[in-house]
Amino acid sequence: MGVRALTVGGTAAVAAVGGAVYWLLGESAPPEPTLPGRLERHRTVLDGRERTWTTYVPDGLRGPAPLLLVLHGSGDDGAAVRRQTGYAFDRLADRHGFVVAYPDGYRGNWNEPRIGGRFAAKELGLSDVDLLRDVATSSDEVDPRRVYATGFSSGGQMALRLALEAPDLVAAIAPVAANVPTTANLAATDLGMPVPALFVTGTADPMNPYGGGEVRLYGTRRRGRVRPALEGARWFAERNGITGDAAVERISDRGSDGAWVESHHWAGSEPVRLLSVHGGGHHYPAVGVRGRRLLGPSPQLLDTPARVWEFVSAHRRPE
């Protein structure tokens, strides 16, 4: 009887632990829609290794068209960030006539600009800038003056690296949950050419600290130090030649969970904008998508994909 009770109790305990883990790590997104365009899988060999990416091409696309690079976070791939953004970029591509590319990092990660973080891509010195250049130039359907990059977390850092090291490639960037690294944690070479940038950051992010400091998840997975979100955006505005103060605006009402969104906008020919999701966690905020609870709250106040496209598509690289 005692053994039976122990077994039943143990099973219940295992189930409870499993349920708690699922609650913390589970995420939800809309089902993959049926879309009129086509998904295409691509491969190339770079640094002696096969690299892959997926593109979504709208039906009846009239080229040369803009291209948006959407870069995933650590441990994920292009398919994951496509799902985590609720397939919103594919829908936007159908509506506005652009190509979306979802590249895959090497073993789930990028050789992005932070010194911290022992990713294989960093340790091997892989040229992810060259990979993304190959993605952008692999199709005649793409307008080389209208190539943009957005990314989540490590993918946002990779978008930042493109702006610093390949400003001849990207016309604008939009890092999400990716504060600018401190000088001591920055491995990229900044060529100093201005690039418009939109930053989206949650104030309740447990990994990428809104107020600056070491990037880590509850004491683990250290990635080095980053600047406070506001300071990093201001730094980027200054590198773009903007010396004035930001215009500050509240762009959402407070939700039932107390979350709200604030905008800081540094105006200029290469503008910089910071959208602060007050009460938001370490997620790429998208309508109808709930990220992993372990990474903080997922307020439903900001359609980030639409905001990203609105911002980046207003720019093109000069001749």
Image (cartoon, rainbow, N blue to C red):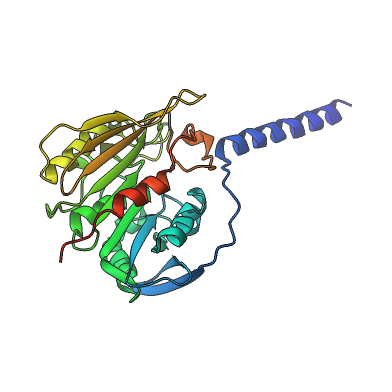
- Residue 301 lies, in percent from the top left, at 46, 34
- Residue 250 lies, in percent from the top left, at 33, 28
Count of numbered marks: 0
Q: Is residue 144 above or below residue 263?
A: below
- Is 204 in front, or is 97? 97
Residue name at image x 62 percent, y 33 percent:
20
Q: Quadrant of residue 25?
A: top right
Residue 69 is at least partly visible in this image: yes
- Residue 74 lies, in percent from the top left, at 41, 49
- Is 125 in front, or is 211? 211
Residue 228 is at least partly visible in this image: no
Residue at the farthest bottom position? 140
Q: Is residue 22 left or right of residue 96?
A: right
Q: Is residue 62 left or right of residue 273?
A: right
- Residue 41 lies, in percent from the top left, at 47, 71
Q: The N terminus lies in which quarter of the figure?
A: top right
Q: Is residue 1 left or right of residue 270?
A: right
Residue at the farthest right position? 1
Q: Quadrant of residue 201?
A: top left
Q: Is residue 249 above or below residue 124?
A: above
Q: The C terminus lies in which quarter of the figure?
A: bottom left
- Is 4 in front, or is 74? 74
Q: Quadrant of residue 100?
A: bottom left
Residue name at image x 44 percent, y 24 percent:
254
